Image (cartoon, rainbow, N blue to C red):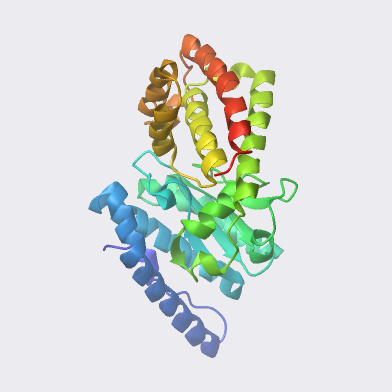
């Protein structure tokens, strides 16, 4: 694999002894990260992207992990790939969802270093560096139940500026992290946090279905957006699966499953949502087909009671 040149850059600072220790530690991290990305991580990415794109994404992830160690040192617990790629449903159009686990809260200098890192990463040549989306969470937070009032340092897809957000502070995220995450650096996630109890995961899916319906009812513009409309259809399919099975699968896989259990009248809407997944950055700036937006609202009204009911049944 051809890794980004920054993996071979060894920073020099402080006294000579510290320089040597820093160099040794960074060499060790780079070697461990390369080994991880060349092993299971790469094989899982190749199966979804093919050799060329998997190599490019692995390079970005390895660079992220090495630079994070330079910024956080012993505070860094691990770097993990989550989302579509962890679920085995990633493709060229997918976000690169990640989680950085830390041994404790970041101090002011560390937070600034992380912000500077993400402000600079999109300057890399690889397009994957523009698609990074993820959060920084302490092990203490990860081991607790999801709390929407607890925010984590977060960078949105394509953004250079970080914010404090509860975007990833969910049970779905914890389930993916424990059960499906791809390790870039650090220990396996199964040893970092407990798995999410099935009932907790199913109840969150039901609650989210109701909350999203209420929010969309208050602002239907979301469904008139060229990205929002198909995204909501696929999200509903996955919520139904999670509520019934206490597991999380990729949105496209959930769409295929949903067509097996939902009436045929909804199949066309689901198929179109899958077809509309490519080019999300272009679609977010376009208007959705208005008749399809209205049909999506009808789909929400139909499927939300099914999701809440599924969460109460035996998996």
Q: Which residue is located at x 49 percent, y 60 percent?
A: 80
Horizontal and vertical percent position of residue 74: 59, 75
Name the spot of residue 41 as percent of width and height, x first.
36, 61
Judge by depth and name the residue closer to the eye, 187 or 299.
Answer: 299
Residue 308 occupies which quadrant of the picture?
top right
The answer to whether residue 168 shows anywhere in this view is: no
**41 and 110: which is toward the camera:** 41
Q: Residue furthest front?
A: 314
- Where in the figure is residue 313, as x and y percent of width and height? 60, 39
Which quarter of the rendering shows the N terminus? bottom left
Q: Quadrant of the C terminus?
A: top right
Q: Which residue is at 50% across, 46% downward?
A: 248
Residue sitting farthest toward the left: 51
Relative to the observer, which residue lies in front, 106 or 223? 223
In the figure, residue 297 lies in which quadrant? top right
Question: Which residue is painted at 62% across and 44% down in the image?
Answer: 167
The reply to whether residue 142 is in sight is: yes
Residue visible at 56% across and 20% down? 302
The relative height of residue 191 versus residue 225 in the rendered view (above or below) is: below
Q: Give the image quarter of residue 220.
A: top right
Give the vertical position of 194 relative to 246 (above or below): below
Left or right of 8? Residue 69 is: right
Given the current orientation, which residue lies at the most extreme top position?
291
**Number of marks in the image?**
0
| Relative depth, front residue between 257 and 28 | 257
Picture coordinates of residue 66 (x, y %)?
46, 67
Left of 146 or right of it: where is 17? left
- Name the outermost residue toward the right: 149
């Amino acid at each position: 694999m051809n890794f980004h040149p920054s993996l071979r850059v060894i920073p020099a600072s402080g006294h000579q002894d510290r320089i040597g220790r820093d160099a040794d530690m960074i060499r060790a991290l780079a070697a461990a990260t390369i080994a991880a990305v060349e092993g299971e991580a790469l094989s899982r990415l190749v199966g979804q992207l093919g050799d060329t794109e998997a190599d490019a994404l692995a390079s970005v992830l390895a660079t992220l992990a090495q630079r994070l160690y330079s910024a956080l040192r012993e505070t860094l617990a691990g770097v993990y790939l989550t989302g579509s790629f962890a679920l085995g449903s990633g493709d060229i159009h997918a976000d690169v969802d990640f989680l950085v686990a830390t041994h404790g809260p970041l101090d002011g200098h560390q937070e600034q270093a992380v912000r500077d890192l993400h402000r600079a990463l999109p300057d890399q040549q690889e397009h994957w560096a523009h698609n990074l989306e993820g959060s920084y969470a302490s092990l203490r937070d990860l081991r607790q139940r999801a709390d929407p009032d607890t925010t984590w340092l977060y960078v949105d897809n394509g953004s250079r500026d970080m914010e404090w957000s509860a975007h990833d502070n969910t049970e779905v995220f914890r389930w993916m992290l424990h059960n499906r995450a791809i390790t870039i650096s650090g220990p396996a996630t199964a040893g970092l946090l407990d798995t999410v109890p099935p009932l907790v995961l199913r109840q969150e899916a039901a609650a989210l279905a109701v909350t999203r319906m209420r929010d969309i009812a208050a602002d239907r513009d979301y469904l008139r957006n060229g990205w929002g409309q198909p995204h909501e259809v696929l999200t509903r399919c996955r919520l139904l699966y999670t509520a019934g099975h206490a597991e999380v699968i990729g949105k496209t896989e959930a769409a295929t499953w949903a067509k097996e259990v939902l009436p045929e009248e909804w199949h066309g809407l689901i198929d179109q949502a899958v077809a509309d997944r490519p080019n999300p950055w272009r679609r977010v700036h376009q208007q959705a087909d208005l008749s399809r937006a209205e049909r999506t609202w009808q789909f929400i009204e139909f499927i939300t009671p099914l999701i809440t009911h599924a969460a109460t049944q035996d998996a």
